[in-house]
Amino acid sequence: MYKVIGIVGSPRPIGNTRYLVNEALEVLKTKGIDVELIPLDDKRIAPCEACNACGELLNCRIEDDFQEIFAQLNYFFFINGMIVPGSTCWNVGYGLDPESVKGDEEAIRTVRDLVRNMAWLIKKLKA
């Protein structure tokens, strides 16, 4: 089973980053790919203390909301062999107001191109 996780690191719950990630996930859904959105705006995540517990124990010693996300990422990185496909250019969208990035045609086109490439890759891996 293949799944794409979109992680939104923006502190804005209804912002341009979330809009672009949702746009990407919607395109993938139309290709029959399972998707999940993980927004971080409502999570309590402490800064890294560079203690190297994650490297030695495969677990962060800081107890915050990152533990749940770290467990999901470990599942994909270590168990499922996570693949991170590249894009044809910078995945940048411009907009100040919530969802104003909708007017950035190049950004929308770039996101759609990226996820079409991701869908193609996933389907090739399934074959």
Image (tube, rainbow, N blue to C red):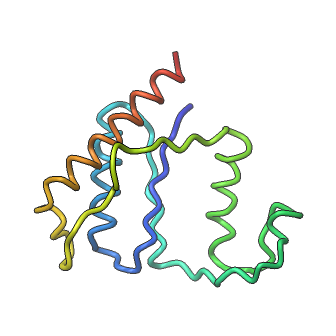
Q: In this view, does 51 lie above or below 5?
A: below
Seen from the viewer's position, the closer of residues 15 and 32 is: 15
User: Looking at the rendering, in which quadrant would you find the N terminus?
Assistant: top right
Q: Please indicate whether residue 64 sits to the left or right of residue 92 in the image.
A: right
The picture quadrant where one finds residue 48 is bottom right
The picture quadrant where one finds residue 80 is top right
Q: Is residue 32 above or below residue 98?
A: above
Q: Residue at x 47, y 79 (%)?
A: 42
Q: Residue at x 34, y 79 (%)?
A: 12
- Residue 122 in percent (x, y) is at 47, 29
Numbered label tally = 0
Seen from the viewer's position, the closer of residues 40 and 121 is: 121
Q: Residue furthest left?
A: 103
Seen from the viewer's position, the closer of residues 4 and 34 is: 4
Seen from the viewer's position, the closer of residues 2 and 122 is: 122
Q: In this view, does 43 lie above or below 78?
A: below
